[in-house]
Amino acid sequence: MYHHLKKLMYTVRIGTPDPKFGKMLLEQFGGANGELAAAMQYSIQGLNCDDPGRKDLLMDIGTEELSHLEVVGTLARMHLKPMKHERTAAEADPLIAIVGGGGVSLNNSAGNPWTADYLKISGQLEVDLRNNIAAEARAKITYENLIHFTDDPGTIDALNFLMTREITHMKAFAFALDSLGRTPFSIGELPPNPEWVNKYFNDSTGTGDNGENDERGPWNQGDDWEYVQSPEVEAFKAGAAANGGVRRPVTAEAAKAGKK
Ligand code: MN
Ligand code: MN
């Protein structure tokens, strides 16, 4: 069951309202990486989870995300409020001003409605936890981007708190994943086919005039990797080298003179 305490998780104060920034903040209210999406993703994963420890984790963080929704919604509302009565403010977004009366709604910063399509719920715990680690990373960077677009100290303070909590959640999800005791590439129940699993296909050209310099690193060499060349890429490199290099970009002058 849910209870509601009329107290914010983090106190929000702002200076001068900035309706255009308020609209940007809606990205974290009704957007793909926003707080409603996080709250719903973790809580619904929790309903599907049979492991008592991880279920508790999912419900704890899902519930905290609802508190974040309340904080970011309160913050956005403070910035949007002048849109209700002030013509200049209303011009920041007529939809919010005229249809929404300068209030928050479950839309993203472009006015698109929230959708359950944002949620990643797989019914497989190690997959869900990986999705959640990625979701927290996206939420963190969205807050970071928002912080870059305001100078208001109170707004930055609240956003910094919300951004910080996403790293805390990422840490909890990462440890929960690790504690499942599965090897890093063990997903689901069926093992991968050993004939194919360690083959790295070099399917794109590298750097250099003829694409000859393929990049190598731990993602394609060492360990059990087998580096497999693509016949098409090799043929391209050979052909380009034989022609004295790949086609050069057409300069503006050459294009004007009708040259290719
Ligand atoms: Mn959050
Ligand atoms: Mn979070």
Image (tube, rainbow, N blue to C red):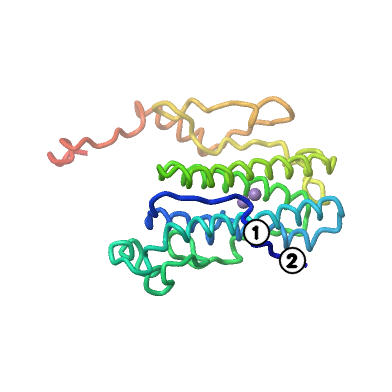
SS under mark 1: helix
**Percent position of residue 207, x then y:** 45, 28
SS under mark 2: loop
Q: Note whether 229 is above or below 75 in the view shown.
A: above
Q: Amino acid at mark 2?
A: Tyr
Residue receiving disc 1 = 66
149 left or right of 42?
A: left
Q: Is mark 2 within 8 Å of ligand 1?
A: no
For label 1, count other residues whose C-alpha is less than 10 Å away and answer few (under 14), some (14-19) or many (20+).
Answer: some
253 left or right of 209?
A: left
Closer to the camera, 11 or 235?
Answer: 11
Residue appearing at x 53%, y 59% in the figure: 73
Sequence-first tag of 2 and 1: 2
Q: Are marks 2 and 1 in contact (CB under 8 Å)?
A: yes
Residue 153: quadrant of the picture: top left
Quadrant where the N terminus sits is: bottom right
Q: Note whether 181 is above or below 244 in the view shown.
A: below
**Percent position of residue 240, x then y:** 40, 31
**Percent position of residue 115, x then y:** 57, 66
Q: Residue furthest bottom?
A: 99
For label 2, count other residues whose C-alpha is less than 10 Å away and answer few (under 14), some (14-19) or many (20+).
Answer: few
Residue receiving disc 2 = 2
**Percent position of residue 189, x then y:** 83, 51
